[in-house]
Amino acid sequence: MTDLGDYRHVVDRDRVRLERCDACGRHRVEPMPSCPWCGSTPTTAVDAAGTGRVYSWVTVHRALDDAHAVDVPYTIATVELDEGCRVFARLDAPPATVTADLAVAATFLDHDGWTELRFVPAEVAP
Amino acid sequence: MTAAVAGVGYSPFSRESGRTVLSLAREACLGAIDDAGLAVTDVDAIVSFSLNHDSVPCQAVATALALPGLRFAADLDLGGQAPCHLVGLAAMAVETGRARNVLVFRALNGRSGARVGAMEFAGGGAPFRYPIGYGAYSMYVAMWARRFLLETGHDAEDLAAVVVAQREYAAANERALRRRTVTRDEYLAEPYVVEPFRASDCTVEVDGACAVVVTSEERARDLRHRPAVVASTAYRAGPRPGLDIGDHLLWDDYTRNYTSFLREELFARAGLTPADVQVAQIYDCFSSTVLMGLEGLGLCERGGAGAFVRSGATALDGRMPMNTHGGLLAEGYLHGMNTVTEAVLQVQGRGGTRQAPHHEVAVVTSGALMDGSAMVLTRGNS
């Protein structure tokens, strides 16, 4: 599997840790040395609320690797968090029920050595 | 001084070449030089591109061709964004006197060797895709396609129209890997690979190489074929193109790719408008990028690309024949270099049974998502 790199820092147990630009207030999921909107460097770490909406999604019927082949079909969504930034994550919902702008909430799945951020429809969130 | 493409060359396309990439590259480059009517020693520059080291560097081809030297070279670490951009670089080298005759090539064992469809792209965005099972380029383009279809009022019928139209062309193209036509019903009956894509929405990976020679229009006039004049090229990455080739997390609008951003500059430099285009070769690693490219370039209004294709406008007897070789969907995935060579053949009037009747102005695109390039070729005088 790919090196988890910064993922383990961003998704830490049951938290999603964002970088918020001190200059323009925009949030980002991927850690980077400067703000991709305004270029300034100072940031504050903030925890995401864990809620958002589906911007787009795909349902994978043929997985790329064996680790995920057992899960097909599965859905990956581009989720726009309430903080305004996006993240890719598994959306645990029947594919036919997924719509654009569907309200979703974060769940966390523990793997060996890392925690995966997933989403479920907000209406079925625990 | 204006640059022009003088010749094209191909190796055979296959699912298993049994040859080295350098051997394929050499054959395509020699073919292009010969097609132009030049001597090998006339070449003084080479530019190319590769993904994850799936090709050979320009220096290797210079060595294989026994060139006395290179005055200009560029090896780009890019995928399908590169071909038109490289023709642009070659044209600039010619126009500024840095080179006289430039080879532009792409070569790979894309089927029997490293396959892009199963390739991991290293970079800052990788940890946010691969561990969760979001790891194929098809998935990324499908992610854009879903939103594009929804926002622009398209659906599976429109993807089907692209596939059916291009497979029709491919049936008459001996080089194409997929030569069997498909009907709308057959397409719709295919299972999904990555919904909304079925197998026929996805390019077919191939072993092979192709190349062009870029020279000055003036020199090209004295060569074997009528010049395909490089009237304009443009490269563009929109804002926040991401941390690596697959990273689209910071891209705001999945319904608009680089074509929307470079359109104005592309046509202005050529002194032409989208309405002047008579032949189009639109990058199609996946069917949806054709629809997005048609709208991004202004060849169709927003939401109108599907209806345009369904109307037959892109067929040989239509208003603007498009992807006349069957595209990457059917001819094979030479990462858009074969999209360029097909455009050259069309502009030069050498399309054979698939020659577009009107071919004074062609537009070509390279790339699918955040960044890419395009060019306008016009028919020169011999």
Image (cartoon, grey):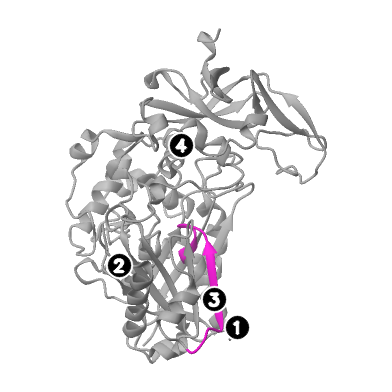
Residue B143 is marked as 4
Report the side of A89 relative to B8 (left or right).
right
The answer to whether B5 is drawn above or below residue B321 in the figure is below
Q: Which dot, 2 or 4, sits closer to the camera?
A: 2
Furthest residue in direction top, as rendered? A126
Where disc 2 sits, the SS reads loop
> Mark 3 and mark 2 in contact (Cβ < 8 Å)?
no
Residue that numbered label 3 is attached to: B73
> Mark 2 and mark 1 in contact (Cβ < 8 Å)?
no
Residue drawn at the location 43% of the way across and 41% of the way down: B136
The question of residue B77 being in magenta is answered with yes
Mark 3 vs 4, N-terminal side: 3
Residue drawn at the location 30% of the way across and 33% of the way down: B192
Amino acid at dot 4:
Met
Find the magenta span and give its range. B68-83
**Mark-to-mark CA distance, 2 and 4:** 35 Å
Mark 2 vs 3, N-terminal side: 2
The question of residue B90 being in magenta is answered with no
Residue that numbered label 2 is attached to: B19
Residue B96 is marked as 1
Mark 2 vs 4, N-terminal side: 2
